[in-house]
């Protein structure tokens, strides 16, 4: 039967053209209730769309199509996170302009996305590297700058001494340059920072009201890292100077046997004349400077440090004289950059004390062997003077009170979160819209002069000084100061890739607006995002930066909601068939294009949703694909065996059950079980008499998953309008209720109990067990052998003992 062949290639192309030429996916503002369904937009890399993209995008497409059919106005946009390092590096290698490369890659991505039949609002596309877009990224930066939330500071960058260039963190692999493998150093450079720390508390509190996976919330919590402790003042012996330390264990003050300051601590420079071994200290500082913070806090790294000769600290509770060390396990960026070391009760101090032969002084009676490790638990104080015998919590409170009265301590909250280093020494990013004037200092570009466009240059080679390639373009750099008209220079650093993705969901709402970031009324109408789906790898950075910018835009009254994403869902990773991560080097990547060519987009869509729960990690399996393909083929062929018979009651009940299951499952992201129930339906009805009415409903249910095939059958059934806005079928709760029936249970001919069972239920071991376990029946059969167990369906149960 040649005419019944499932020709997916023809079908898919035909409907993609139809949707496009009839503008069906375009977004229109209307009066319907909205649903904003957002994907994490892709970085248009040269490699093209990968399976992970198609997983998340298929899920959101199912939801977008489903909610349209439920009557919502669905905002479902896509765009391109188009600035970034790989493109710039590729440009350096090939001599092509990054803009050209980006456009090519975007065209490729767009075509791939369209070939999957995704119903994106193509009139809502954004591209972060488009001046009309980054104009507003720059505008936001200027607002941050005006509020004092963007500032300059000297910060070490990763510096490759061989390539003579600054490196992004992702280009540093195990402390080495990704390209030439030279050991990466740290080099101090002036950088822009954003004061995300001002928002630490709100970023933390806001998490409570979000419908996000607990795992992501706790990752963000830890990243923000709120710590409630005490700042204590230690005076220095024979100097009119003090050292502040931050501690969460003031109860261990009597156990302090030395102090440690970070290599960057300011007193080192200030008292260099009092330090007898200053050159040794300087040597140590130099080495420490080349380590990243991650290396420094790595617990498995051997502790290093140098005793500072000539300066000593005094313990505020007992005036004990304490040696002071400089050691890189203490960070300058946390607390006050100095610690009171309690080797008996802090593991890092314990390890340091082992290495430098420093004494342990136990002050908490708690479990563990102090010869093997620090005793970090709480317990009862000892060797602590008037605090002996008290519990840790009480000692903390009393010691702090005592020191506060003497002005030697105060309660303090610290956050691990640091300000966001916001500049990159790169070409392919948004220029930072700031002008450096000798007279006026830092001046922001006038808003009417935005965007500050990236100059089109031929040479993106790094400068060799660590500055951005933009620094080479004198015509671009030299400008007059917007304030005094005097000679001035543009900022040459560009923004990090995170900038454009920190607000893009706002621009989707009003992509063409050239007066404002977006129209206020529309922002109010379409925010917040109802659902955001993407990979868990963005748990912290992107999602934290996006929340920060949104909160800031809320504070300056651009948006009316503090949190951008009400609900977040993470798709699980799809692994290769060998259970390993897909990667170029392992040559185990599955290319969506290949699957589409061989089995079609509908099969791919269905398969990715069927292999397992959306949130789970799962492995690719080619046999599974064939199963899905056969299922779709069967559905396709069913349209030809439709009989114009009257409605079959059994089918009618089954379709209502299926409608309910599929609807509930879609709303709960259980796409795999929704598909399974469609399969069950098909398996059951194909033997039966399937009529057109029931089949039509099934096709609507299938349409979010396999939209091309569904549309083809839908039109073959005589319909004239696309399924896209066809009303989702409703189910009749009464019809699908299981009917129950009461059965009498006899033992040796006498009725002893009654049991309620579903209509038509078959005899089974379970049923028998259940009956025999009924207390009133048990009574009559204990210690007896059951000779007969007779079950007459829908009538009676009879037991003979
Ligand atoms: C004495 C002490 C005794 C400490 C003890 C702990 C246990 P969190 O909870 O992460 O905030 N610390 C303070 N500033 C530091 C810095 N700049 N670099 C490295 N470590 C620093 O940790 C607070 C604890 O980390 C502080 O409490 C301090 O050590 C250390 F039995 O003070 B503790
Ligand atoms: Zn000026």
Image (cartoon, helix red, strand yellow):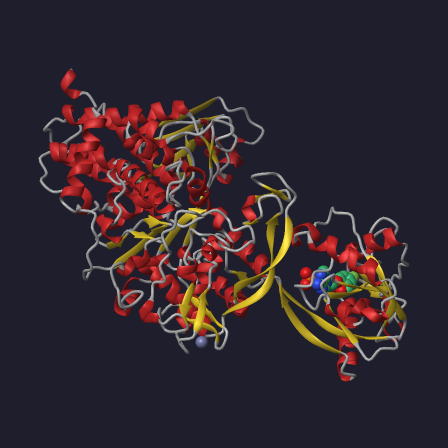
Question: Relative to 133, does residue 555 appear above or below in the rendering?
Answer: below
Q: Indicate left or right for 395 with 309 as reference.
A: left
The reply to whether residue 449 is in sight is yes
The x, y position of residue 171, in whole percent, is 55, 44
For this orientation, the residue located farthest to the top is 1
Query: Could you tell whether 754 is left or right of 121 in the image?
Result: right
- Relative to 413, residue 657 above or below: above
**Residue at (37% x, 44% y) in the render:** 97
In front: 109, or 736? 109
Question: Residue at the spot x=18%, y=29% of the render?
Answer: 690
622 vs 599, left or right, is right
**Which quarter of the image is occupied by the N terminus?**
top left
Residue 189, image quadrant: bottom right
Q: Up-down: is 584 above or below 206?
A: above
Say which of 82 and 664 sits in front.
82
Quarter of the render that holds ligand 1: bottom right
Q: Is residue 756 visible?
A: no
Q: In the image, is 725 to the left or to the right of 786? A: left
798 or 729, nearer to the observer: 729
| Nearer to the camera, 20 or 471 | 471
Q: Is residue 205 above or below residue 667?
A: below
Percent from the top left, x then y, of residue 29? 20, 59
Q: Position of residue 237 (x, y in %)?
A: 87, 75
The residue lying at 25 percent from left, 37 percent from top is: 702
- The mark total stands at 0
């Amino acid at each position: 039967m040649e005419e019944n062949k499932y020709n997916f290639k023809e079908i898919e192309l035909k409907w993609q053209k139809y949707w496009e030429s009839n503008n069906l996916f375009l977004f229109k503002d209307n009066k319907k209730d909205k649903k904003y369904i957002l994907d994490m937009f892709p970085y248009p890399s040269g490699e093209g769309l990968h399976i992970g993209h198609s997983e998340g995008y298929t899920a959101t497409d199912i939801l977008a199509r489903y909610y349209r059919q439920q009557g919502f106005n669905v905002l479902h946009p896509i765009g391109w996170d188009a600035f970034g390092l790989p493109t710039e590096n590729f440009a350096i290698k090939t001599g092509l302009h990054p803009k050209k490369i980006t456009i090519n890659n975007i065209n490729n991505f767009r075509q791939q996305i369209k070939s999957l039949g995704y119903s994106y609002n193509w009139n809502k596309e954004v591209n972060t590297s488009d001046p009309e877009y980054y104009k507003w990224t720059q505008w936001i930066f200027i607002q941050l700058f005006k509020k004092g939330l963007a500032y300059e500071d000297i910060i070490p960058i990763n510096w490759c001494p061989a390539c003579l260039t600054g490196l992004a963190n992702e280009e540093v692999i195990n402390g080495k340059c990704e390209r030439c493998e030279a050991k990466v150093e740290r080099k101090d450079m002036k950088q822009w920072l954003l004061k995300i720390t001002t928002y630490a508390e709100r970023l933390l509190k806001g998490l409570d009201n979000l419908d996000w996976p607990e795992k992501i919330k706790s990752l963000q919590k830890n990243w923000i890292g709120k710590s409630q402790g005490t700042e204590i003042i230690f005076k220095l012996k024979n100097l009119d100077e003090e050292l502040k330390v931050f501690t969460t264990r003031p109860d261990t003050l009597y156990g302090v046997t030395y102090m440690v300051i970070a290599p960057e601590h300011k007193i080192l420079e200030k008292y260099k004349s009092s330090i007898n071994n200053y050159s040794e200290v300087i040597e140590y500082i130099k080495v420490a400077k080349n380590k990243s913070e991650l290396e420094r806090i790595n617990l498995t790294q051997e502790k290093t440090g140098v005793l500072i000769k000539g300066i000593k600290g005094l313990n505020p509770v007992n005036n004990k004289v304490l040696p002071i060390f400089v050691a890189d396990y203490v960070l300058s960026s946390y607390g006050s950059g100095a610690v009171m070391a309690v080797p008996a009760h802090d593991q890092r101090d314990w390890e340091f004390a082992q290495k430098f032969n420093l004494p342990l002084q136990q002050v908490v009676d708690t479990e563990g062997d102090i010869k093997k490790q620090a005793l970090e638990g709480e317990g009862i104080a000892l060797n602590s003077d008037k605090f002996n015998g008290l519990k840790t919590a009480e000692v903390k409170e009393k010691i702090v009170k005592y020191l506060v009265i003497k002005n030697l301590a105060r309660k303090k909250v610290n956050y691990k979160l640091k300000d966001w280093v916001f500049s990159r020494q790169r070409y392919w990013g948004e220029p930072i819209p700031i002008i450096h004037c000798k007279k006026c200092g830092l001046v922001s570009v006038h808003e009417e002069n935005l965007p500050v466009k990236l100059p089109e240059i031929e040479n993106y080679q790094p400068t060799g000084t660590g500055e951005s390639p933009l620094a080479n373009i004198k015509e671009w750099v030299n400008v007059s100061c917007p304030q005094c008209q005097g000679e001035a220079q543009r900022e040459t650093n560009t923004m990090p890739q995170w900038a454009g993705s920190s607000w893009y969901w706002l621009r989707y709402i009003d992509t063409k607006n050239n007066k404002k970031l977006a129209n206020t009324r529309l922002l109010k109408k379409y925010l917040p995002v109802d659902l955001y789906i993407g990979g868990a790898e963005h748990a912290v950075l992107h999602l934290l930066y996006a929340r920060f910018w949104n909160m800031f835009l809320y504070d300056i009254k651009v948006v009316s909601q503090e949190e951008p994403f009400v609900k977040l869902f993470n798709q699980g990773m799809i692994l290769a068939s060998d259970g390993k991560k897909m990667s170029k080097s392992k040559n185990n990547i599955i290319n969506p294009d290949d699957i589409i060519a061989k089995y079609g987009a509908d099969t791919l869509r269905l398969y990715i949703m069927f292999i397992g729960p959306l949130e789970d990690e799962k492995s690719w399996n080619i046999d599974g694909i064939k199963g899905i393909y056969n299922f779709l083929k069967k559905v396709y062929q069913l349209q030809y065996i439709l009989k114009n018979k009257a409605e079959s009651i059994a089918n009618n009940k089954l379709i209502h059950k299926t409608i309910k299951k599929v609807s509930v499952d879609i709303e709960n992201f259980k796409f795999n079980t929704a598909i399974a129930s469609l399969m069950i339906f098909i398996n059951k009805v194909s033997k039966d008499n399937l009529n057109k009415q029931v089949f039509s409903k099934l096709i609507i249910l299938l349409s979010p998953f396999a939209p091309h095939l569904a549309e083809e059958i839908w039109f073959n059934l005589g319909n004239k309008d696309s399924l896209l806005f066809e009303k989702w079928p409703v189910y009749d709760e009464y019809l699908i209720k299981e009917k129950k029936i009461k059965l009498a249970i006899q033992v040796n001919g006498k009725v002893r109990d009654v049991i309620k069972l579903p209509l038509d239920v078959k005899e089974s071991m379970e049923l028998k067990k259940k009956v025999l376990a009924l207390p009133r029946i048990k009574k009559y059969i204990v210690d007896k052998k059951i000779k007969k167990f007779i079950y007459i369906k829908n009538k009676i149960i009879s037991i003979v003992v």
